[in-house]
């Protein structure tokens, strides 16, 4: 029996920390679905389709190729556990940077288990990525700061273009 996991997030934009979690999870599971999900509490900078393309480009830059073992998809509405059922995933992967992330994620993990018996595995971020969030990256980029330590080249270019378009 194969092990299938879903790694959900808004990924707006995907950071090197997210990509590190994806790489590590892909090494553990037979199949990993990176899933761009809609968060009604956030106003995304990039569309779902743009985020999927940025994830694919970023994975390629790092030599992590999507295919049968690794896929990128979107979930713009509905429950995450329904997507998990659809792809026969028994595990959700969540990266965390600190205890605040865990405080936010633990109730959702319990509800997902209650709704569909899907387990959540928490993966600590690598120390070099532990303080970086997508929100912080967007803020630095908006102020014309260098985000190259935090995101792939594809994401850095997209952020620079987005910033130029907002100012232009």
Image (tube, rainbow, N blue to C red):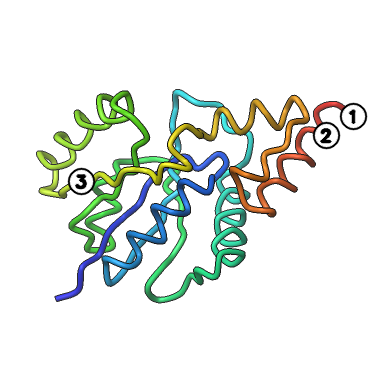
Residue 168 marker: 1
Q: Residue at x 61, y 53 (%)?
A: 54
Say if 125 sits above or below 21 in the image.
Answer: above
- Are the residues at dot 3 and dot 2 in contact (C-beta closer than 8 Å)? no
For the residues marked 3 and 2, what is the alpha-carbon distance in whole angstroms? 39 Å
Q: Which residue is mark 2?
A: 165
Residue 103, image quadrant: top left
Drawn side of residue 43 relative to residue 5, left or right: right
Q: How would you rate the neighbour count of disc 1 (Cα within 10 Å): few for under 14, some for 14-19, many for 20 or more?
A: few
Q: Are marks 2 and 1 in contact (CB under 8 Å)?
A: yes
Using residue 4 as the reference point, say whether residue 140 is left or right of it: right
Q: Is residue 89 left or right of residue 42?
A: left
**Circles 1 and 3: CB atoms closer than 8 Å:** no
Helix, strand or loop at label 3? It is strand
Residue ID at (61%, 57%): 53
Give percent across and percent down for residue 95.
Answer: 34, 43
Q: Position of residue 166 (x, y in %)?
A: 80, 28
Q: Residue at x 69, y 53 (%)?
A: 153
Q: Pick whichever, 29 or 38, lies toward us.
A: 29
Q: Earlier in the sequence, mark 1 or mark 3?
A: 3
Looking at the rendered structure, the number of numbered marks drawn on it comes to 3
Residue hosting label 3: 120
- The C terminus is located in which quarter? top right
Is residue 129 placed above or below 118 in the rendered structure?
above
Q: Is residue 149 above or below residue 145?
A: below
Of residue 131 and residue 74, the one placed in the foreground of this image is 131
**Picture coordinates of residue 150, whole percent (x, y):** 59, 43
Tell me residue 114's x, y (percent).
Answer: 9, 39
Left/right of residue 167 with respect to residue 116 in the rendered view? right
Assign a secondary structure to mark 2.
helix
């Amino acid at each position: 029996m194969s092990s299938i996991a879903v790694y959900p997030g808004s990924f707006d934009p995907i950071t090197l920390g997210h990509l590190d979690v994806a790489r590590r999870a892909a090494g553990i599971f037979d199949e990993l679905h990176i899933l761009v999900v809609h968060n009604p509490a956030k106003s995304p900078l990039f569309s779902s389709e743009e985020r999927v393309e940025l994830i694919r480009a970023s994975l390629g830059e790092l030599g992590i190729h999507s295919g049968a073992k690794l896929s990128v998809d979107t979930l713009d509405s509905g429950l995450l556990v329904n997507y998990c059922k659809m792809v026969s995933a028994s595990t959700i992967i969540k990266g965390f940077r600190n205890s605040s992330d865990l405080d936010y994620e633990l109730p959702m993990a319990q509800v997902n288990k209650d709704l569909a018996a899907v387990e959540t595995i928490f993966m600590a971020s690598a120390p070099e990525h532990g303080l970086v969030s997508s929100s912080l990256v967007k803020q630095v980029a908006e102020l014309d700061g260098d985000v190259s330590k935090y995101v792939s080249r594809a994401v850095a270019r997209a952020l620079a273009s987005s910033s130029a378009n907002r100012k232009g």
